[in-house]
Image: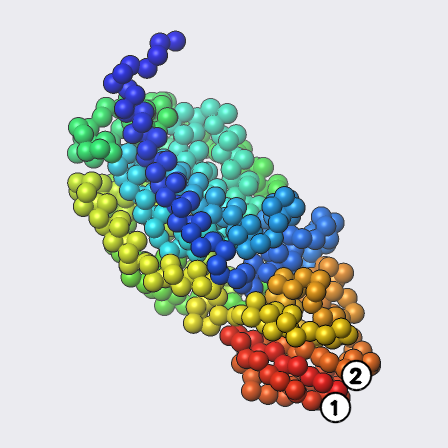
Amino acid sequence: MHPPAASERPRDRRGRLVWAAPGLLTLVVTLAGIGHAQPWRDELATWSAATRPVPDLVRLAGTIDAATGPYYLLMHGWTALFGTSPAALRLPSALAMAGTAALTARLGARLAGPRAGLLAGLLLAVLPVTSRYGQEARPYALATLLAVLATLLLVGALGRPTWRRFTGYAVAVAALGLLHLIALTLLAAHALVVLLVAARGPAAAGLDPTPRPDEARAVTGEAAPTTGGTQAVTGEAAPAAGARGPGVIWRWLLALLPAAVLVAPLVLAAGGQRGRQLDWVRLARVDDLAALPGALAQSGVVGGLLVGLAALGAGRLGRRALLPGAAVLLPVLLLFAAGTAVPLWVTRYLVFTVPFACLLAGAALAGVRLAPALAVVTLAGLLGLPDQAALRRTHEWPRSAPVDYAGVARIVGDREQPGDAVVYSPRDSWLFPDLGLAYHLGPRRPRDVLVVRDQRQRADLWAAECDRPAECLAGVDRVWLVVTGRRADPLAAVPGAKGDALRDAFTVRQVWPRPGLTVALLTR
């Protein structure tokens, strides 16, 4: 084997720069302030589930959150090694987003040239949405990584359809389905490309890795490389001329079998839990589509800029825009169509489409010189700075309505006395006030006096309370009452028998309003 020629070494370094620079920039951005915002309600659910023994995790999946069960299992192992601080809980997502930016650059280089790939990855790095879900202990960042990885592996497999390549693709798709069922709508885009490749070859589907001369500038702005240069950047060989025919379809379908086998039980379980899991979601409306870019980008102005650049990039790429364009449009349209009939339309479920929009935008920016293209990326980052700062203060939405679990925990922890009890209202709230206090106070929190079966015993995210609260409160002289919302009279806000028992036996001694919650000290 001959050592690489001296002229190839700079090209190899530029090839590494294409994916390394976006990955490193994304890691820096997502790690900045990763532990500042306190865990919000969804992250509290992750913490509650991940810290349970594995048998209890299995039981939980049979009750609620079955679709998120594999992620909880992954986080169970992670928290056992690295703890449950906010930064530790979110670090897997930060690493996943960094990997996503690197793979987006690789995919962009494969489809549109190295400069387009580099700019796509850099643009993804500075978007507020990348920080938002790169700093959240939920599965969306990992699913986004797997969506781009599966697409990149498919491109390689369609270029040279070997069983080894399709096996890698099969693993990525199965993992994607286990982490995020909705992300499997990406397979509609994959199916479209596979059918075109089978009928007319990779070039007809826009997978020809040989860029046009005017688009093939190297990252540094040098003359267009040859096909071999593109191979050096992407690490992939050019598609074989015979990569077409029914065999490609059959190999792709066989690659989907592991995902079908593994995901089918989750689909059945999640379908039975949908009414309870998504009871807060309404049916999709047309105006939801108009609001989607800003909601996905976590910034209205940045979302508008991204859509505009993506549209320009699609026009510039022509047929090579088919795969990234379909990877954006088809999942959105499929989820919207389903969401008009069944409450499923949740914006964050579509985060995995953002890298493909960035790929199209990177292709648009690749049409100008590198300096002004980088200026546009910088502008996108600057426009998103207010949202970047806001999401590091709170993950709640809207961000003008934070929930201060830590503040309530400090009030209770600083003033608690032996024998104190705590009562929550409402107990079945999606704000999880009990989990918030448990996370921040741990075993030091007051006794949850009304609980007869806690979350772990119930295999649920909510505890069960006693039917006769007055009897359960007997012998307690001081009660910390935590209610959701801002309440001038929190005791009057407690409904039912629980409220009657508290009002009959206790008076309010002091009230502390906190954002999203109110805590009161009751004495007998």
Where residue 149 appears, as percent x and y from the top left, is: 45, 38
Where residue 144 appears, as percent x and y from the top left, is: 46, 46
Q: What amino acid is at disc 1?
A: Asp
Q: Residue at x 35, y 47 (%)?
A: 124
Please determine whether, in this image, residue 141 is positioned above or below residue 403: above
Question: CB of mark 1 within 8 Å of CB of mark 2?
Answer: yes
Where residue 111 appears, as percent x and y from the top left, is: 31, 35
Q: Disc 1 marks which residue?
A: 504
Residue 208 bears which disc, if any? none
Query: 439 or 60, which lies in front?
Result: 439
Q: Residue at x 28, y 59 (%)?
A: 383
Q: Residues within 10 Å of mark 2 (few under 14, many from 20)?
A: some
Whether residue 247 is visible: no
**Within the image, what quadrant is residue 362 found in?**
top left
Q: Residue at x 35, y 53 (%)?
A: 127
Query: 141 or 80, which lies in front?
Result: 80
Whether residue 170 is visible: yes
**Within the image, what quadrant is residue 27 found in?**
top left
- Tell me the SS state at disc 2: helix
Please determine whether, in this image, residue 254 is positioned above or below residue 89: above
Query: 258 or 218, which lies in front?
Result: 218
In the picture, the quarter occupied by the C terminus is: bottom right
Q: Residue at x 36, y 43 (%)?
A: 25
Q: Disc 2 marks which residue?
A: 470
The disc, 1 or 2, on the residue closer to the chain's N-terminal end is 2
**Within the image, what quadrant is residue 398 found in?**
bottom left
Please determine whether, in this image, residue 497 is positioned above or below residue 416: below
